């Protein structure tokens, strides 16, 4: 391992319930999940001295620090690009802890994304700002590509055309996620598995994407506590050591619409993150025992399997059909049910599942020893991911 | 919101207004005049779309434009069913066109049954009013009467 890799760990995880209508403010959800994560880590609230968040987080760190009576913060940082950046606040936290800028950094994401503004409903409130950040919308929104599903469908269509993947191949991801969710009491779709027929009968959203290819919209909050690996060793849970944590922007990157590259169905920013993770952690895809792959839409799970090197390009459908993502397979994936089955908390609930896999406490814990878990952020946007490991 | 004269409920489009800047105004002005312009680097000649202030190949800030033939082939497409915005009729086909000049543009597709769309099919660019009355490109299958350089 090199650099900061291995020097920090996730020592606490905590969440609210995941629902479609929390009945509480987003601010309160944030406070609740932060307290739950600190309680899980057995670290006192007063010790928190850092926060790392999404830029899309509407509960600023100062509001949560004020509400919880956290007296001093020495580190606070925000990462853009929504779910693509999901793992990057953990990288920021690890960097801060490894360099001594802060000792206890909390990451959280809390929102009423179903009962409040729904991401699937159209452009978000900030889309109407007149600035360079939103200028890319000139080239997609006026023509009716208004949602992430519609924007991503162009890649999915091209991928199907190139490799012969079908809607049923995407549906296999949905069916597996709902199988895992059916066994997860925290999942919205607890005890509600689906069949491939259900997937194929679900309405088209943006062809080829069907309703059951799309993640949920959810209310809820999830927090993570990051401390030094040395400190984590003395806490109640086995540390989920951050052995890799990377961000990536690729050539000619545009948010959700990098349509001007030679191949739109290839994601160089994901490959860039993979390369960094293997370099930092000193391991490769063959050493990853389970993965949490960002599943806003099912096709991206196939593309990510390929970009991370678990199978060759175009072969993800066969890799899945061969049972490799099952609990007894080579690479159990999204064992909490993913954002398709558990809840959509912008990927941060997936990081918590990565921690549970390392602890051995997932409701769908694979039978084999889990030493290393890959957790990824969303695509096709600027990307981020983590490798979490048992202490070596 | 309600229509001021009829009082009828009017659904407002969620399409954000265009963000016209000193970097891209030429393109929207071209479209208003029935021309599909492509930005060209004034030094190395590389074409770029969408427009930007500087050439990503040679970093030159000099540029001019060429006028596109408005023809190309469909690189990919989607047919949007939900959610529905008041500015469009659904199902709404939207395509990514490989222009013959080598750049790409996104536009909605008219003049054909979405079920007839295939990757690689020949398409042409026409100009129509969009969500807020602005004239913008639309794609349609190449018509037999297509004439190079003429504005439909």
Image (spheres, coloured by chain):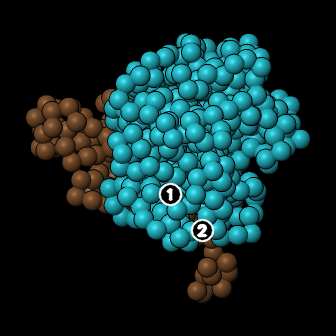
The cyan-tinted chain is: A
Q: Looking at the image, which residue is at 75% across and 55% down?
A: A17
x then y, percent, for residue A129: 40, 65
Q: Are marks 1 and 2 on the same chain?
A: yes
* Left or right relative to A115: residue B152: left
x then y, percent, for residue A53: 48, 53
Q: Looking at the image, which residue is at 51% across and 41% down?
A: A231
Q: Which residue is mark 2?
A: A27
Answer above or below: position of B76 versus B21: above
Does any portion of residue A148 appear in the rendered image? no
* Left or right relative to A170: residue A284: left
Q: Looking at the image, which residue is at 42% across and 65% down?
A: A72
Q: Which residue is mark 1?
A: A47
Q: Residue B4 is drawn in which quadrant?
A: bottom right
Subunit of label 2: A
Name of the residue lying farthest toward the front: A234
User: Callout 2: helix, strand or loop?
Assistant: helix
Does any portion of residue A131 appear in the rendered image? yes
x then y, percent, for residue A234: 58, 39
x then y, percent, for residue A207: 66, 38
The brown-tinted chain is: B
Name of the residue lying farthest toward the right: A191
Looking at the rendered structure, the number of numbered marks drawn on it comes to: 2
């Amino acid at each position: 391992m090199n650099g900061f890799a291995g020097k920090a760990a996730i020592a606490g995880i905590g969440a609210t319930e995941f629902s479609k209508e929390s009945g509480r403010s987003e601010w309160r959800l944030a406070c609740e999940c932060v307290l739950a994560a600190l309680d899980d880590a057995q670290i006192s609230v007063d010790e928190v001295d850092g926060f790392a968040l999404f830029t899309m987080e509407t509960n600023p760190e100062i509001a949560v620090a004020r509400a919880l009576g956290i007296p001093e913060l020495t580190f606070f940082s925000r990462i853009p690009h929504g779910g693509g950046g999901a793992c990057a606040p953990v990288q920021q936290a690890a960097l801060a802890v490894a360099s001594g800028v802060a000792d206890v950094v909390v990451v959280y994401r809390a929102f009423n994304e179903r009962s409040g503004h729904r991401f699937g409903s159209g452009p978000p409130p900030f889309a109407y700002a007149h600035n360079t950040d939103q200028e890319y919308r000139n080239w997609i929104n006026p023509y009716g590509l208004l949602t992430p599903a519609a924007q991503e469908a162009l890649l999915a269509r091209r991928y199907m055309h190139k490799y012969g993947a079908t809607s049923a191949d995407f549906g296999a991801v949905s069916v597996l996620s709902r199988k895992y969710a059916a066994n997860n009491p925290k999942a919205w779709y607890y005890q509600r598995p689906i069949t491939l027929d259900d997937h194929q009968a679900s309405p088209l959203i943006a062809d080829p994407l069907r309703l059951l290819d799309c993640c949920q919209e959810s209310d809820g909050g999830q927090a993570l506590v990051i401390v030094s690996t040395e400190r984590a060793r003395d806490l109640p849970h086995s540390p989920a050591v951050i052995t890799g944590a990377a961000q990536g922007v690729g050539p000619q990157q545009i948010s959700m619409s990098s349509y001007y590259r030679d191949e739109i169905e290839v994601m160089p920013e994901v490959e860039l993150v993979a390369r960094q993770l293997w370099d930092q952690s000193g391991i490769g895809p063959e050493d990853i025992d389970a993965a949490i792959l960002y599943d806003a839409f099912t096709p991206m799970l196939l593309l990510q399997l390929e970009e991370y090197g678990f199978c060759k390009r175009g072969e993800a459908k066969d890799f899945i059909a061969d049972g490799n993502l099952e609990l007894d397979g080579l690479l159990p994936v999204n064992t909490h049910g993913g954002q398709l089955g558990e809840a959509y908390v912008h990927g941060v609930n997936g990081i918590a599942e990565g921690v549970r896999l390392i602890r051995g406490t997932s409701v769908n814990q694979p039978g084999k020893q889990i030493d290393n878990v890959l957790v990824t952020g969303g695509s096709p946007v600027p990307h981020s991911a983590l490798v979490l490991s048992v202490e070596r | 919101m309600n229509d001021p004269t009829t009082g009828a409920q009017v659904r407002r489009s969620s399409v954000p207004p265009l963000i016209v800047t000193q970097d891209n105004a030429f393109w929207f002005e071209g479209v208003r005049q029935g021309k599909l312009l492509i930005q060209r680097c004034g030094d190395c000649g590389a074409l770029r779309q969408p427009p930007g202030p500087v050439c990503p190949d040679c970093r030159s800030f000099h540029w001019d434009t060429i006028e596109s033939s408005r023809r190309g082939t469909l690189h990919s497409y989607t047919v949007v069913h939900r959610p529905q915005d008041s500015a469009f009729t659904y199902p709404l086909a939207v395509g990514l066109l490989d222009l013959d000049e080598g750049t790409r543009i996104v536009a909605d597709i008219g003049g054909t049954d979405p079920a007839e769309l295939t990757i690689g099919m020949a398409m042409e660019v026409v100009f129509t009013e969009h969500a807020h009355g602005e004239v913008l490109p639309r794609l349609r299958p190449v018509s037999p009467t297509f004439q190079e350089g003429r504005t439909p």
